Image (tube, grey):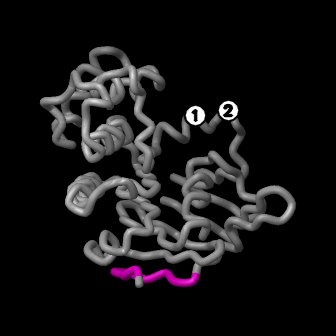
Amino acid sequence: MIRLDGVTKVYGDDTVAVDQVSFEVAKGDFIFLVGQSGSGKSTLLRLMSREEIATEGDVWVAGRNLSEMAASRVPYLRRSLGNVFQDYKLLLNKTVFENVAFALEVIGKPRHVIREQVPLVLELVGLADKTERFPNQLSGGEQQRVSIARAFVNRPVILLADEPTGNLDPATSEGIMALLEEINETGTTVVMATHDHRVVNTMRRRVIQLDRGVVVRDQERGVYE
């Protein structure tokens, strides 16, 4: 599903964000990328979504080599990816329903599909009763649920999550992780960057640890020490 072969990313002349990283993620896996700030976690996610291009090496996602992909094909790649962010990135002037619907509108889904799919995914994330609320009327955890609904409404094969519990209290984080686990159980591959030891140690999934851009540990059912 995802394969990195000798991937290095250099910013500017000499800032090495990722250094000779290689690993594979199988379909349906749930992977934690862990490490301190600046270790390269977010850079890896941006490489997987083709927001960045590797300086060296190859990044394969869903059978496609992103290092060789034409820019015109990137929007089609992203239809098979969902992205969840620490700061939600919601449209403040749109309701919960409209925020989620927007993800389908931009890829040209017809209105009847949007009317059918959005309520289903809002039910999944526990927001069926808040469709007409605006983001500033929601708690942080509810806003993150909207973000996850938007990322999942097109049923992506891969969900990339960058510190999705970073701004949330422990109880709310637990709910978000339960939701991501439920999405993973539908067959969606989840790759999550985090520095939240508690989340990682509770779930005990595969852990890939980075230190200054280098993979220092790749462990099944790992913990974040």
Q: Residues within 10 Å of mark 2 (few under 14, many from 20)?
A: few
Where disc 2 sits, the SS reads helix
Residue 192 vertical placement versus 75 (above, below): below
List x then y, in percent, for residue 151: 38, 41
Amino acid type of the residue tagged 1 in the rendering: Pro
Question: What is the magenta range?
Answer: 216-224
Q: Residue furthest left?
A: 129
Q: Which residue is mark 2?
A: 72
Question: Could you tell whether 145 is left or right of 75 in the image?
Answer: left
- Of the pair 222 and 78, the residue shown nearer to us: 222
Residue 176, picture quadrant: bottom left
Give above or below for 9 relative to 186: below
Looking at the rendered image, the quarter that the C terminus falls into is: bottom left
Q: Residue 105: horizontal and vertical position, in percent?
A: 42, 21
Residue 185 can be seen in this image: no
Amino acid under label 2? Answer: Ser
Location of residue 97 by image quarter = top left
43 in magenta: no
Q: Residues within 10 Å of mark 1 (few under 14, many from 20)?
A: few
Q: Is residue 115 left or right of residue 43?
A: left
Asked if labels 1 and 2 touch by Cβ distance under 8 angstroms, the answer is yes
